Amino acid sequence: MRVKSVLGLSSSVVGVLLLQACMTPPPKPAPAPVTKVAPAPVEAPAPPKVVVPPPPPPPEPHDVAARRLLAYHEQIRQLSPQDLTNEINRLNAAVSATPTAAPPDAVLELALALAQQHNGGDVARAVALLEPIARSSAPELAPWQPLARLLLGRVLEQRRLEELVNREAARNRDQQRTLQQLNEKLEALKAIERSMSSRPTGGAPTPGPTPPPASTPPATPAPAAPKAP
């Protein structure tokens, strides 16, 4: 009986101990040692890439021709009349008798300089220089043809206006000449009127010398009557 009680007591103690063991938290693990990590080496930044732009495309021949003629027009616009004459003489030496055989830039420059003088003969020659280029089918003249057509239209209009001005000036000269003749006739009539009004009106006019008698012409014989058949 005593043995059973002892065993029961022992089992009770063991149960209490087991319960305490379950209720007691497990011990915290020791912290792991901190290892210092060396910083990674900083890499130097890579040099920027040099981007080489592609070369610009070559200018169009039409653009080159237009820029050249515009620059030449601005140049001769500021020349004096004597300097412009010298420039025309220089271009005349560069342009041959046949305009199509001469450089097209020199031909257009000569036509532009001739049109700048506003002379009738020079304008006609400018038209003769521009027409072959404007109507040509040669491929080497293609960049200059739009400029030649533009300049030709301007020169033809200039010639038309100059001819109109010349006709109007001739008409004015004719009218001035007619007016002068009428004035001269009017002055002559006024002079006759003044001379008639200055003659004396009273008394008989003084007889002048008697003119000699006119000689009587010989009598002309009457024509004979026609004979009866």
Image (cartoon, rainbow, N blue to C red):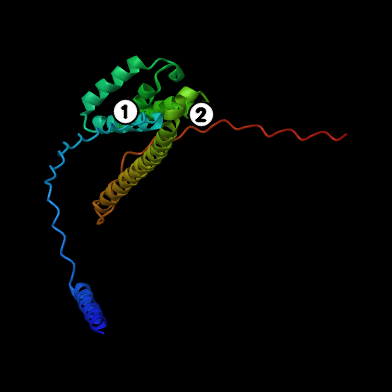
- x then y, percent, for residue 4: 26, 82
Can you tell which mark lies on residue 135?
A: 2
Tell me which label, 1 or 2, sits earlier in the chain: 1
Can you tell which mark lies on residue 113?
A: 1
Residue at the image point whose x is 26% and y is 53% from the top: 197
Q: Is residue 157 left or right of residue 3?
A: right
Front residue (pair 211, 177): 177
Numbered disc in front, either 1 or 2 = 2
Can you tell which mark lies on residue 52?
A: none
Q: How many marks?
A: 2
Residue at the image point whose x is 13% and y is 43% from the top: 39
Kindly tell me whether residue 182 is visible in this rendering.
yes
Front residue (pair 224, 144): 144
Amino acid type assigned to the residue bearing label 1 in the image: Ala
Q: Is residue 24 above or below residue 222?
A: below
Q: Is residue 15 left or right of residue 66?
A: left
Front residue (pair 177, 123): 123
Q: Residue furthest front?
A: 1
